[in-house]
Amino acid sequence: MQICGLIGGRRAKPDSKYFAGSGKAEEIAATVAASQAEVVLFNHALSPAQERNLEQLIRCRVVDRVSLILDIFASRAKSAEGKLQVELAQLEHLATRLVRGWTHLERQKGGIGLRGPGETQLETDRRLLGDRVKMLKLRLARLSRQRETQRRARSRNRVRTVALVGYTNAGKSTLFNALTRAGVYAADQLFATLDTTSRRLYLEGVGEVVLSDTVGFISELPHSLVEAFRATLEATAQADLLLHVVDGASSAREHQMLEVNKVLAEIGAAGVPQLLVINKIDLAGIDPGVARDEYGKLQAVRVSARTGLGLDLLRQSLADLLKDAAPGDTEPGHAGMVTPTGIS
């Protein structure tokens, strides 16, 4: 893929027809014509009407932020459940855009088979899509009940659970592999992990805990995607402790932390205690260490999952926080909602 041009702009509010305003839309159209670009990406969510108007003006395919994220998720999903979740989000997003592809078929047709008497092609397509969405939701609900049964079994056995959360590409999977030797897929790319993976981790003085790697978050995460992945993200909301992994080398780390906490609130995990893990200290030029507030309460641990720096401090911090907490306890140790301390 080759980038043919980058066009930015500022508006007090989006234009109802083109989102970017007629003048900016004409500029985009001219750039597309001059470069013969095949796709225009908007880093914003567009309404179906805005997408349709832009495509008519620009004469090429227009993809908004939501569609792009869904496409990336579709290419990354590996497990059966992950594929179901992505398909559900895609279909719910497509449902608002069906009219784009079927305007030439908006006429009533009687017939035998899928279409009923007097049903238009668009109505048929909507009905079939609705049936598929219902089926996907039923299958995901069954998987959610199975996961709840497993969670209750762990609780009865007094097994503590820890979930890794963080902005996409913060290094969660690399940290997960470093702690558990799980060998899950980890790469320097957005949404390398879509499927929740859990492994047992032994901590001195605590015993075995269950550590879960989860999907990374991103700003303006599509609501349909959050809903589709709600079953998977239940592991986060029901954990005893969250390890909030932050890219210590990113200049946008504070913004990313806020975005992660927004999604955690949306899925009902805002009250789960957190331990901040500043990752990639080897790239940021930061020494490994532990940060505490003025009362001596643990706030953050600085590590490098790639090189192993500080992992012994992280294991000890986890043990200190969990050894006095029973499974399901909402207040292990002194961890809690954290602010960007201990980064430098």
Image (tube, rainbow, N blue to C red):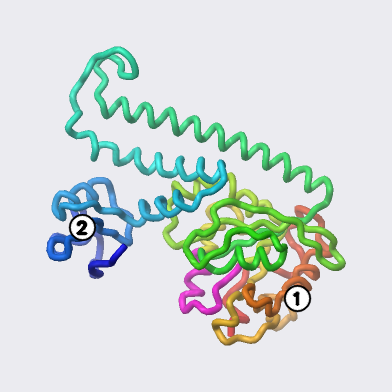
- Seen at 73% across and 42% down, the residue is 150
Question: Residue at the location (44% across, 46% down)?
Answer: 224
Q: Nearer the viewer, residue 169 or 333?
A: 169
Residue at image location 62% in from the left, 58% down from the top: 184
Q: Earlier in the sequence, mark 2 or mark 1?
A: 2
In which quadrant is the N terminus drawn?
bottom left
Q: Is residue 250 in view?
A: yes
Spot occupied by residue 192 in the image (x, y as percentages of width and height): 52, 59
**Image coords of residue 151 (percent x, y):** 73, 45
In this rendering, the count of numbered labels is 2
Q: Categorize mark 1 by other alpha carbons within 10 Å: few (<14), some (14-19), many (20+).
A: some
Pick the front one: 26 or 280: 280
Q: Could you tell me residue 42's position as x and y percent?
A: 29, 60
Dividing the image into 4 quarters, which one contains the C terminus?
bottom right
The amino acid type found where label 2 is placed reads Asp
Is residue 103 part of the magenta span, yes or no? no
Residue 312, numbered circle: 1
Q: Which mark is residue 82?
A: none
Inspect this view and state whether residue 292 appears.
no
Tell me the residue that label 2 is attached to: 15
Secondary structure found at label 1: helix
Q: Nearer the viewer, residue 44 or 266?
A: 44
Foreground mark, 2 or 1, reads 1
> Does the magenta portion include 246?
yes
Residue at the extreme right of the image, as rendered: 205
Counting from the top left corner in percent of width and height, residue 335 is at 71, 69
Q: Amino acid at mark 1?
A: Asp
Per the rendered image, the range of residues in magenta is: 245-259
Mark 2 surroundings: few (<14), some (14-19) or many (≥20) residues within 10 A? few
For residue 264, which quarter of the picture?
A: bottom right
Q: Are marks 2 and 1 in contact (CB under 8 Å)?
A: no
Whole-number angstrom distance, CA of label 2 to CA of label 1: 53 Å
